[in-house]
Amino acid sequence: MRPIYQLGSFSLKTTVVLFFLALVAGAQSAGPATALALDREGKLPEAVEAWRAFLKSSPNDPGAWASLGVDLSRLQLYRDAADAYRKALSLDPNLPAIQLNLGLAEFKSNNFAAAIKPLRAALAADPKNSQARTLLGLSYYGAGSFADAVNHLTIASASDPDNAELHNVLAQSCLSAKKFDCALSEFSWILRRTPDSAAAHMLLGEALDGQGKTPEAIAEFEAAAKADPRTPNLNFGLGYLYWKLRRNDEAAQAFEKELSIDPKNAQALAYLGDVELKRENPEKALSLLQQALAIREDLRVAQLDLGVLLTQQKKYPEALAALKRAAQLDPGQPEVHYRLGRLYQAMGDSQTAQQEFAEVQKLHQKAEDDIADKLSPGKPGPRQ
C-alpha cells in the first residue's frame, strides 16, 4: 500500500536544486563550498552550521537561506526550515522549488493553514505537480476547509486511483463538507477493499444518515458492531441513530454498551439520561445528566433535560441557568424556548414567558442532527 505522499526522502531533483542554490549563494565562497561538501558526505548538522556561519557575513543571500532550509528539513527541524525558506523568499520570490518546500515544512509542522498559501503558489507555478496538489488538499483538510480539500483531493485521487489512504481522506472530507454523494462513493470503494472494516462501515453509515437514510445507516453501524463491537464511539453512534427513530429501548442498550467500554463517554451518558427521562425515570435520568455535564458542560440535550427535571422539582433558579445554557448552545431550537416560557410562567413572569413563546412561533422545527455531527466533535459548529 503506497503512502499518500512522500515527505522524508530527497530526490535527485532536490539535490540538483540544492546544488543550484549553492551556486546562487556563491560557489567560490568557502562557506557554501564547505556546506555543499558536508551535504554530500551526509553531515547535515555540520552543513547547517556552515550555512549559518556564512549567513552571518552574507545575511541577504537568498540561495544560502534556501539551502539552509533544505538541510534543516532533512534534519526534520521543520519550523526552523520554514523560517529559513520565508527569509529566502523575502529576498528572492522566484527561487526554484522553495514555495513547495515552505509548504511542505509548514505541513510537517502541522501548521496546515500556513501551508496553504505557499502550496497554492507552488501549484500555480506547476499545475501538474501532483505532490503540491496532494499536499494542498491535505492542508485544506487539516485546516478544516473541507470543501476546498474535496476539490483538490478529488483530482489527486484520480491520478493515483489505488491509493487507499488518499481515498480515505477524500471520503472524510466529503463527509465533513456534507457532500454525501461523494462520501458514499468513496466509502463504498473503501469497503470493497476492506469489507470487514468497522471504521469504514461507520463512516458509510454517517454518509447515509446525512442523506436522511437513517435505517440504512443503522444497518451499516450494526455491520460495524459485528466486525468490531469495541470500536470507540460505535455503540454510541448506533444508539444515537436508534434514538433519532425513537427506538428508545434499543438506544438505551447501545448507550449502555458504549459506557461499558468508556464509562466517561459524556454523550452516551447524556442521551441515556434523555432516554430515562422519556421512560419517566427522573432520578436515574438526573444522575446520568449530572455525570455527563461534569465531563462536558456544552451538551445541549443534557442542559435542556436538566432544566426540565429541575423545573419539575421547582428548583427554578437552577432550572433557569440550565435552560439558558441550552439556549446559548443552540438558540434555534424551539423546545428550549418553550421550556423557558413554561418556567417563566411558573416563576410568575408572564411578560418574559410570552416573549419566549413568541420566539417559539418564529422558529421552524429543525431536522435532527445527523450522526456525522455527533461523531466528529472537532468540526466547526456541531450541535450537541
Image: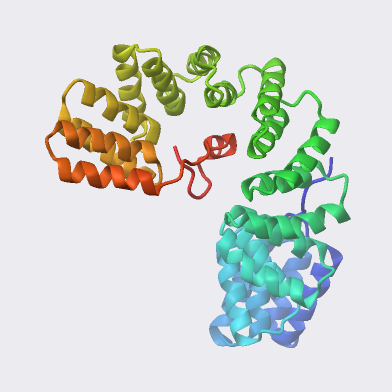
Front residue of this view, candidates 244 and 169 = 244
Model colouring: rainbow
- Residue at horizontal 63%, vertical 81%? 89
Q: How many marks?
A: 0
Q: Position of residue 247 (x, y in %)?
A: 54, 17
Q: Position of residue 11 (x, y in %)?
A: 83, 62
For this view, does 319 lie left or right of residue 264? Answer: left
Q: Is residue 76 above or below residue 243?
A: below
Q: Is residue 15 above or below residue 349?
A: below
For this view, does 366 lie left or right of residue 81? Answer: left
For this view, does 72 lie left or right of residue 336? Answer: right
Residue lying at the far left in this picture: please name it: 348
- Residue 133 appears in which quarter of the rendering? bottom right
- Residue at horizontal 75%, vertical 40%? 184
Q: Is residue 286 above or below residue 52?
A: above
For this view, does 310 lie left or right of residue 101? Answer: left
